[in-house]
Amino acid sequence: MPERLLREAPWAADARGLGRDAVRALFDELSLAPKPGLVSFEDSGSHADMDAQTFMRSLRALRHYFPQIAALGAQQAPFTALQAAGLAAERRMLAATGGVNTHRGAVFALGLLCAAGGALQARGQVLTPEALRTELQVRWGRALGQRARLLPASHGVAAVQRHGLRGANEEAAAGMPVLFDAVFPALRQALAMGWGWERARLQALFAAMAALDDTNLVHRGGLQALRTVQAQAAAFLAAGGAGRPDALMQARALHRAWVARWWSPGGSADLLAAACWLQRVCA
């Protein structure tokens, strides 16, 4: 469809809105601190090759991608078109960051969610977590399952195969159960309890770390790193989570401990951003 007609399509403004909210959600993730092992405006976490400014350059490079993929969803584009848009966005991200992978996981996960949102809005449907999850599975679940089986070798794929984990592709093919069953409910419940935006995001992050098979951690510290982070995150939640008076102090202690071991739960950070997007578009 010509660019002028794209801009004038009934769903075009909605697609742009979904894309803007995706960039805002990534900023929501970046601006949270403390955030164990991860980059924030306070420090670089367990990363020597990136900082918050690297992430900001990446966000600027991706600002057109999320509206684009939402528009592709509105046009009922096949998965191959979504994949091509995502790969092009990755190239722009790497060019902006000097080859540093800041947001590859978010390009994938948030891109799929924007596409699902675009498809729903083009049909006049209200965005709800349930509708987005169903759209994701029905429209692209089979293609995502095939993609998971055909992916070339990588650190994440190796971890999934060696340890029998469920990686990002498997999660997406299953309808992102960790996001919809654990992370977003944690964010929403914390907000309902009056904990505020900062602590609600912290609660959602710990819910992600407790439940997700984060292959970033396996790559950096082996299966033991993943299991330790999952156990410590679960213990944090069981002791009162982000609502406890000393929650920020406890999160900073974990941050120091994980940075010392070079552990970074990057997959969990992607799910935090996805939960922030859901909060923005479904609230």
Image (tube, rainbow, N blue to C red):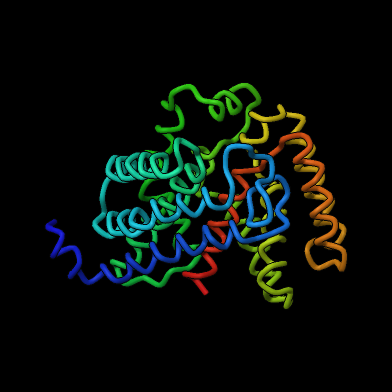
Q: Nearer the viewer, residue 165 or 273?
A: 273
Q: Which of 62 and 279 is in front in this view?
A: 62
Left or right: where does residue 13 sit relative to residue 39? left
In the rendered image, residue 15, in percent from the top left (x then y), is placed at 32, 65
Q: Nearer the viewer, residue 53 or 79?
A: 53
Count of all numbered marks drawn on residues in the image? 0
In the rendered image, residue 150, in percent from the top left (x then y), is placed at 41, 26
**235 in relation to 24, above or below:** above
In the rendered image, residue 97, in percent from the top left (x then y), is placed at 46, 42
Who's the residue at 71% across and 27% down the image?
Answer: 222
Who's the residue at 84% across and 50% down the image?
Answer: 253
Who's the residue at 47% across and 42% down the image?
Answer: 104
Who's the residue at 18% across and 63% down the image?
Answer: 6
Picture quarter with the N terminus: bottom left
Left or right: where does residue 56 sit relative to residue 245? left
Occupied quadrant, residue 181: bottom right
In the rendered image, residue 233, in percent from the top left (x then y), is placed at 78, 49
Occupied quadrant, residue 75: bottom left
**168 in relation to 200, above or below:** above
Left or right: where does residue 54 sit relative to residue 255? left
